[in-house]
Structure formats: structure tokens, C-alpha cells
Image (cartoon, grey):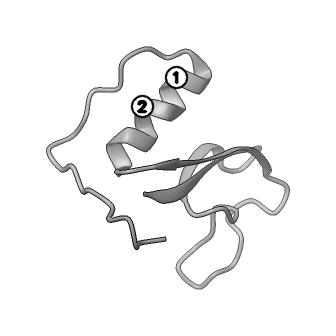
Amino acid sequence: MAVFSIWEGELCGIALKRGPGPPDFRDGSPWDPAATKILVFEAASWNEACQRQCDHYGWGHYEPHDRWEEIGPDEV
């Protein structure tokens, strides 16, 4: 399982991110400094996290992409 978070902001819109921190660029600078953390949760894969996001916003069933990367119990 891994931690994911959902953020909302003027610049980032609705952003799903692995980890509890705000959306950022590769250099670590914030994508949207004014973004607000909406939800933090654990999921076993990216697709499961996407479904949780869909559930949170009432968007219905998430159609997974080809990849389904399981996250081991020791991964953060």
C-alpha cells in the first residue's frame, strides 16, 4: 500500500498525487503553491487510487489503463 493525496488549486486543477505532499515539478518546486489538500488515503496501485478519486468526486467507474502496478506492503 502507498499513500496518495488529492489536491485542488487554481493552477493544478484537481491533482492526484502519490505521497502526502503537494503537486510539484521534477525539481521539487510546487506546481501550485496555493493548492489545498482535499484527501489523503492509501491504495495498492495507481489504478486503485484513481478509482478512489472517482469515488470521492462521484465520477463513477474508473476505466483502468493497461498498467496495473501493485504496491508492496513495504513500499511507502
The quarter of the displayed image where residue 70 is located: bottom left
Element on which disc 2 rests: helix
Q: Residue at x 36, y 50 (%)?
A: 46
Q: Is residue 65 left or right of residue 2?
A: left
In the image, residue 60 lies at what x, y percent? 43, 14
Kindly identify which numbered label has been placed on residue 51: 2
In the image, residue 54 lies at what x, y percent? 49, 26
Residue to which mark 1 is pinned: 55
55 vs 14, nearest the viewer: 55
Mark 2: which amino acid? Answer: Gln
Q: Quadrant of the N terminus?
A: bottom left
Q: Residues within 10 Å of mark 1 (few under 14, many from 20)?
A: few
Q: Residue at x 21, y 40 (%)?
A: 65
Up the image or down, 18 lies above or below 54; here it is below
Q: How many marks?
A: 2
Q: Is residue 18 left or right of residue 45?
A: right
Q: Is residue 8 left or right of residue 43?
A: right
